[in-house]
Image (cartoon, helix red, strand yellow):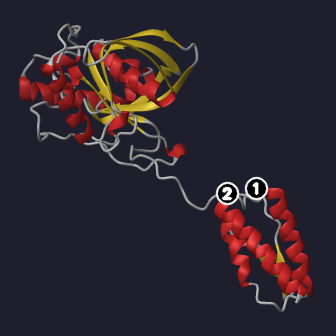
Amino acid sequence: KEQRALCDRVRKMTTCFARNNLLSIATFSTSLICMSSVLSRAHALRPAFVQGPSMLVGRPLSTSVAGTRHIAFPTADHMKPRYSHKASALPLARRHLSAGGLRASAAESVPVEEEVDPGVVEGTDLRILKYPHPKLRAPDEEVSVFDDELKRIVKEMFLVMYASKGVGLAAPQVGINKRIMVFNPEGDKKKWLKEVSLINPKIVAESDGTDVDVEACLSFPDMQGKVRRHKWIKVEAQDLKGKKIKKKYDGWEARVFQHEYDHLDGTVYIDRLDEEGRKEVQPTLDKLIEQYKADHGDDYAL
C-alpha cells in the first residue's frame, strides 16, 4: 500500500512538471530514482504510469534486464524534443541565389524547393531577363519620385519573386534600370511581414570577415558557383515614401542583400566566381549567348 501511494505521488509530480514546468530537473531526477527503488522491490506492479515521464523526456525511460523493470536516468539526449522544426521552404543543399533569391542550406534542415522561371506571372507584365540581356549590365538610375507608380513596381516585383520561388529580386532583372530591390528572407508570401523593399540602397560599412557559399540566379539558369561575401553589412536606403532608413544585415540576409545590390551596379554573380568556377559554367554561358543571339540578334552585353 505504501509503495503504491509513493508511485502515485511520483506520477502526480511528473504530470505537474509536464503541464506547468514547475518541477525542477533535479527534483524530477530524484523522483525517478526513488520510483526506481520502489519498482525494484515491487516490479509486479503494472508500470503503465511510466509513460508519463517517458513522453516528457521524448523517449522511453524504462528498460528490462533479466526480466526486471528498471528506470533509466535521463541524459541530455533524452531531453531533446522529438519534433523537428518546420523551416521555411527555401531550396537545396547549400544556400543558392535564384532570381536574385537565396536557396537555403541543408545544414539548417530547410526543405528543398527548386526555383523556376515563372514566365508569365498573373498581375504583372514584368518578366525575368536572362543573360546576356543588355539591361543586366546597364547603369541603374536613382529613384527621385516616390509615388504610386513606385509602389506598383515594388508590388509586382514581389509577385515575380514569389512566382520564381526566390527570396529576392533586383529591378534590372525585370528590365527596370532603377535602384530598387526587394527581398523576403523567408521566401514565403504568407510571411509578408518579412518583406523588405529598399530604394536607392548603398553599403556604408562591411565586415572584414567573409564566407563562401554557393549561389545561383534565374538570369543564369542551370548553373551555380561559389561566391565570397561579407558576413555583415550596414546599409542606408529609402523606403517607399522616400524616408531614409538604416539597417544592418548579417549572415543569411547579408548574402541576400549583397547579391541583389550587385545587380544594381551591373554586376552579376558569375563576375565573382574564381577561375575554376567560371570555367565550370562557361559551356552553359555559351549556350545562353547563342540562344539570345538567335532570339534577339547581336544586341547583348557580356
Label 2: how many Cα within 10 Å (few below 14, some 14–19, many 20+): few
Split into 4 quadrants, where in the image is the C terminus? top left
Q: Is residue 54 left or right of residue 215?
A: right
Residue at x 44%, y 28% (from the top left corner):
253
Q: Which residue is mark 2?
A: 80
Residue at x 10%, y 16% (from the top left corner):
299
Split into 4 quadrants, where in the image is the N terminus? bottom right
Label 1: how many Cα within 10 Å (few below 14, some 14–19, many 20+): few
* Amino acid type at mark 2: Lys
Q: Is residue 106 left or right of residue 67?
A: left
Residues at circles 1 and 2 in contact by the CB criterion of under 8 Å? yes
Which of 169 and 281 lies nearest the eye of the viewer? 169
* Amino acid type at mark 1: Ala
Residue 124 visible in the snapshot: yes
- Given the current orientation, which residue lies at the most extreme bottom position? 44
Q: State the image quarter where residue 286 is shown.
A: top left
Q: State the image quarter where residue 98 is shown.
A: top left
Q: Is residue 98 left or right of residue 72?
A: left
Judge whether 56 appears above or below 117 on screen. Answer: below
Label ID, residue 5: none
Residue at x 84%, y 92% (from the top left corner):
44
Residue 57 visible in the snapshot: no
Callout 1: helix, strand or loop? loop
Callout 2: helix, strand or loop? loop
Q: Which residue is mark 1?
A: 76
Count of numbered circles on the image? 2
Which of 145 and 63 lies nearest the eye of the viewer? 145
Percent across and percent down for residue 72 are 82, 70
Percent across and percent down for residue 232 are 52, 20
